[in-house]
Amino acid sequence: MDLSGGGTTWTLVDTQSILVWSPTTLLNLLSLFTDHFVQAILSIYSPTCNFFLTTIAAEMNNLDSYPPPFRPQNNQTHNLDPYNPSSDPNEYPDPAPIIDLRCLKQNPDEQKKLEEACKDWGLFRLANHDIPLNLLNQLQDLARDLFSISFESKQALTSDSPVSYFWGTAALTPKGTALARGPQSINWLEGFNIPLSQLSGFDHQVPLLDSFRVLLEEYGNHLSRIARTLYETMAKNLDLDPETSKSFLSEETGIFRVYRYPANPNADAALGMEVHTDSSVLSILHQNDGVNGLEVLRDDQWKTVKSIPNSLIVNLGDMMQAISDDKFKSVKHRVKVNKHRERISICYFVFPGEDVLIQSSTYKPFSYNDFRAQIQEDVKTVGYKVGLERFKINEDC
Ligand SMILES: O=C(O)CCC(=O)C(=O)O
Ligand SMILES: [Fe+2]
């Protein structure tokens, strides 16, 4: 598949004009301004130029910030379709069930709704989570700033650090470095892997990283609270023994993954993230405003989970499916790339204590450690994560 990110000359066509620009010239020009200033200018331009400006806004990040294979190639020209908001999936209602966190503790109907969402979807949108909107916006802004520094600086910043930088795959070793993959399975993403327990190991000398650390600490406290509340309600739904079930959610294992999915005119040729299930108990996701990408598989159809301001997406992972003895579902999902705009998402994953045995009638007893080791092995040998199937009790033997 053609994984090139585009050409150094972007050809943009609308009904009135044909404009051929060199992005290098444009970027040099635009980089003189701050993003916010440019956004303000963009908003006062005439609507006929809107699609053009939207595209340029998406492309104006420093090209040096992208991993080399994601950069436009010199001898290529791309025809970018005009950005057409009326074909935007935002026009359609979002199908995911909505859970109101504030109601969850007291309201049996909301608890029932959660149970249904876990069985039918393995995913839901979370409203009334009580995370300040300001914190979510600041996190997104800082994540964008962090991704905008040069590729080499991102690598240098994270060498010798508990934070790791990766690209092209989301399959990582326990240390957070990318597992080697073949070029055909490259994922159109870059990211930072940040274990919550090691936030203090951030380089305090680098102001951008230090500001990010402060925000992530605050965000991490909120997500631990949310994960605990959701998990306790799920454990009650499943009638799990309260003492045993506690060790299935270990807040110290919390990990952040911050992703950037660069815009790509050949969006149909590459996935941002390939089809997978998460290995976690729960995953909690925040997507930047207005850029869709996440899709879940339901009834054999891919459904877009829209980016809606101030809401979080929660999905159940393989550990939750095993803990629930297959009553709840670890949902298959993937990320599509946007042709015009880059997408940033901030994901939190929480796991059982590493050596805690999960026992069920469907799977052989295994710990998260066993599960992770098996995935590492499978990705190296078979090329992909086999997952829970590896631990299924084979009734024929
Ligand atoms: O970026 C997203 O929307 C989803 C990321 C994801 O599925 C993952 O990290 O497992
Ligand atoms: Fe995922």
Image (cartoon, grey):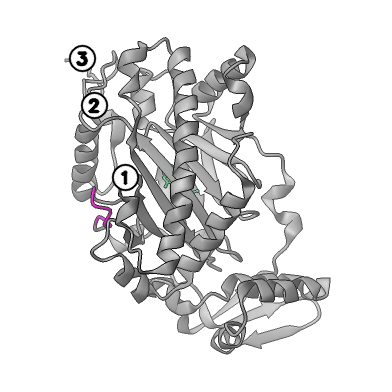
Of tags 3 and 2, which is closer to the observer? Answer: 2
Residue 255 seen: yes
Q: Which residue is mark 2?
A: 391
Q: Nearer the viewer, residue 258 or 276?
A: 258
> On the image, which quarter does residue 52 sit in?
bottom right
Task: Give the residue at mark 1.
Answer: 197
Q: Ligand 2 sits in which quadrant?
A: top left
> Which residue range is magenta in the image?
174-179
| Figure check: 32 above or below 59 | below
How packed mark 1 is, by other alpha carbons closer than 10 Å (few <14, some 14-19, many 20 or more), is: some
Looking at the rendering, in which quadrant would you find the N terminus? bottom left
Q: Which mark is residue 396?
A: 3
Q: Residue at x 37, y 13 (%)?
A: 242
- Provide residue 385's location: percent of width, then percent of height: 29, 42
Query: Quick one: SS at disc 3?
Result: loop
Q: Residue at x 24, y 26 (%)?
A: 391
Q: CA distance from mark 1 to mark 2?
A: 29 Å
Q: Quadrant of residue 184?
A: bottom left
Q: Earlier in the sequence, mark 1 or mark 2?
A: 1
* Quarter of the figure with the C terminus: top left
